[in-house]
Amino acid sequence: PQPGDLIEIDRPLYQHWALYVGDGYVINVTPVDEGAPSLSVSTVSIFTRKAKVKKQLLKEVVGNNNWRVNNKYDRSRTPLPVEEIIWRAERWIDREVPYDVLGNNCEHFVTELRYGKAVSDQVS
Protein backbone atom coordinates (compact mmCIF):
# COMPACT_ATOMS: atom_id res chain seq x y z
CA PRO A 1 0.00 0.00 0.00
CA GLN A 2 0.93 3.64 -0.51
CA PRO A 3 0.30 6.46 2.00
CA GLY A 4 -3.28 7.67 1.63
CA ASP A 5 -4.62 4.31 0.40
CA LEU A 6 -7.83 2.88 1.81
CA ILE A 7 -7.41 -0.60 3.30
CA GLU A 8 -10.42 -2.93 3.31
CA ILE A 9 -10.26 -5.75 5.86
CA ASP A 10 -12.58 -8.75 5.74
CA ARG A 11 -14.26 -9.35 9.10
CA PRO A 12 -17.03 -11.80 9.88
CA LEU A 13 -20.29 -10.16 8.69
CA TYR A 14 -18.76 -6.81 7.62
CA GLN A 15 -15.73 -5.01 6.19
CA HIS A 16 -13.44 -2.93 8.41
CA TRP A 17 -11.68 0.05 6.84
CA ALA A 18 -8.42 1.80 7.67
CA LEU A 19 -6.22 4.46 6.07
CA TYR A 20 -2.62 3.54 5.28
CA VAL A 21 -0.20 6.24 6.45
CA GLY A 22 3.15 4.58 5.70
CA ASP A 23 5.85 2.53 7.45
CA GLY A 24 3.40 -0.33 8.02
CA TYR A 25 0.89 1.84 9.95
CA VAL A 26 -2.79 2.59 9.49
CA ILE A 27 -5.19 4.97 11.18
CA ASN A 28 -8.61 3.53 11.94
CA VAL A 29 -11.56 3.81 14.29
CA THR A 30 -11.93 1.12 16.91
CA PRO A 31 -14.88 0.51 19.22
CA VAL A 32 -14.83 1.95 22.72
CA ASP A 33 -16.29 -0.87 24.79
CA GLU A 34 -15.20 -2.42 28.06
CA GLY A 35 -11.53 -2.55 27.10
CA ALA A 36 -11.95 -4.89 24.12
CA PRO A 37 -8.72 -4.99 22.12
CA SER A 38 -9.25 -3.50 18.66
CA LEU A 39 -8.22 -6.54 16.68
CA SER A 40 -10.79 -8.80 18.29
CA VAL A 41 -13.65 -6.59 17.17
CA SER A 42 -16.80 -8.51 17.94
CA THR A 43 -19.96 -8.30 15.90
CA VAL A 44 -21.64 -6.75 18.95
CA SER A 45 -19.12 -3.89 18.92
CA ILE A 46 -20.30 -2.71 15.49
CA PHE A 47 -23.37 -1.42 17.33
CA THR A 48 -21.38 0.72 19.76
CA ARG A 49 -21.97 4.50 19.86
CA LYS A 50 -18.39 5.63 20.48
CA ALA A 51 -15.09 4.84 18.84
CA LYS A 52 -11.48 5.87 19.27
CA VAL A 53 -9.13 6.78 16.45
CA LYS A 54 -5.90 4.82 16.66
CA LYS A 55 -2.64 4.57 14.76
CA GLN A 56 -1.67 0.89 14.68
CA LEU A 57 0.42 -1.50 12.66
CA LEU A 58 -1.54 -2.81 9.69
CA LYS A 59 -0.61 -6.40 10.59
CA GLU A 60 -2.07 -5.93 14.11
CA VAL A 61 -5.34 -4.51 12.81
CA VAL A 62 -5.66 -7.22 10.15
CA GLY A 63 -4.81 -10.15 12.42
CA ASN A 64 -5.69 -13.35 10.52
CA ASN A 65 -8.17 -11.62 8.22
CA ASN A 66 -7.70 -10.94 4.50
CA TRP A 67 -7.14 -7.36 3.39
CA ARG A 68 -6.63 -5.34 0.22
CA VAL A 69 -5.99 -1.81 -0.97
CA ASN A 70 -9.38 -0.57 -2.16
CA ASN A 71 -9.55 3.00 -3.41
CA LYS A 72 -12.86 2.15 -5.11
CA TYR A 73 -14.26 5.67 -4.91
CA ASP A 74 -11.40 7.08 -7.02
CA ARG A 75 -13.62 6.34 -10.04
CA SER A 76 -16.18 8.90 -8.91
CA ARG A 77 -14.25 11.19 -6.53
CA THR A 78 -10.91 12.94 -6.61
CA PRO A 79 -8.61 12.07 -3.68
CA LEU A 80 -7.12 14.96 -1.74
CA PRO A 81 -3.32 15.39 -1.95
CA VAL A 82 -1.55 12.65 0.05
CA GLU A 83 0.08 15.14 2.44
CA GLU A 84 -3.35 16.57 3.27
CA ILE A 85 -4.89 13.11 3.74
CA ILE A 86 -2.13 12.15 6.22
CA TRP A 87 -2.28 15.51 8.02
CA ARG A 88 -6.07 15.23 8.38
CA ALA A 89 -5.78 11.65 9.66
CA GLU A 90 -3.05 12.32 12.21
CA ARG A 91 -5.10 15.12 13.81
CA TRP A 92 -7.64 12.49 14.90
CA ILE A 93 -5.25 10.05 16.64
CA ASP A 94 -6.35 9.19 20.21
CA ARG A 95 -9.57 11.15 19.91
CA GLU A 96 -12.96 9.69 20.70
CA VAL A 97 -15.49 10.04 17.90
CA PRO A 98 -19.21 9.27 17.58
CA TYR A 99 -19.85 5.96 15.86
CA ASP A 100 -22.95 4.74 14.09
CA VAL A 101 -22.80 1.64 11.90
CA LEU A 102 -25.25 3.18 9.40
CA GLY A 103 -24.27 6.83 9.37
CA ASN A 104 -20.78 7.26 10.78
CA ASN A 105 -18.79 4.03 10.53
CA CYS A 106 -15.14 3.14 9.84
CA GLU A 107 -15.62 3.45 6.06
CA HIS A 108 -17.23 6.88 6.45
CA PHE A 109 -14.24 7.94 8.57
CA VAL A 110 -11.52 6.95 6.07
CA THR A 111 -13.39 8.18 2.98
CA GLU A 112 -13.85 11.56 4.66
CA LEU A 113 -10.07 11.68 5.14
CA ARG A 114 -9.24 10.63 1.56
CA TYR A 115 -11.91 12.52 -0.38
CA GLY A 116 -13.24 15.20 1.96
CA LYS A 117 -16.66 13.51 1.89
CA ALA A 118 -17.84 10.52 3.92
CA VAL A 119 -19.15 7.57 1.86
CA SER A 120 -20.00 3.96 2.69
CA ASP A 121 -21.23 1.38 0.19
CA GLN A 122 -21.79 -1.08 3.04
CA VAL A 123 -24.84 0.84 4.19
CA SER A 124 -26.13 2.02 0.82
Image (cartoon, grey):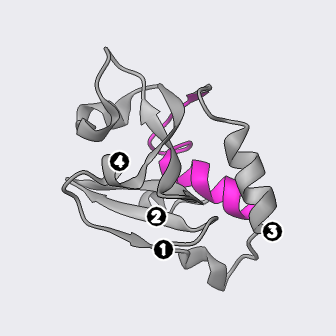
Q: Does the magenta stretch include residue 116?
A: yes
Q: Dot 1 surroundings within 10 Å: few (below 14), some, or many (20 or more)?
A: some
Please tell me which of labels 3 and 2 falls first in the chain. Answer: 2
Marks 4/1: CA–CA distance: 16 Å
Q: Mark number for residue 7?
A: 2
Q: Position of residue 102 (x, y in %)?
A: 48, 45
Asked whether disc 4 touches disc 1, contact meaning CB atoms under 8 Å apart, the reply is: no
**Amino acid type at image mark 1:** Asn
Please tell me which of labels 3 and 4 falls first in the chain. Answer: 4
Q: Which residue in the structure is indicated by mark 4?
A: 61
Marks 1/2: CA–CA distance: 6 Å
Marks 2/4: CA–CA distance: 10 Å
Residue that protrudes farthest toward the front in the picture: 23
**Amino acid type at image mark 4:** Val
Q: Position of residue 31 (x, y in %)?
A: 40, 30
Q: Which residue in the structure is indicated by mark 1?
A: 70
Q: Which residue in the structure is indicated by mark 3?
A: 81
Part of the protein shown in magenta: 97-118
Residue that protrudes farthest toward the bottom in the picture: 75
Marks 3/4: CA–CA distance: 25 Å
Q: For residue 95, what is the image quadrant?
A: top right
**Amino acid type at image mark 2:** Ile
Asked whether disc 1 touches disc 2, contact meaning CB atoms under 8 Å apart, the reply is: yes
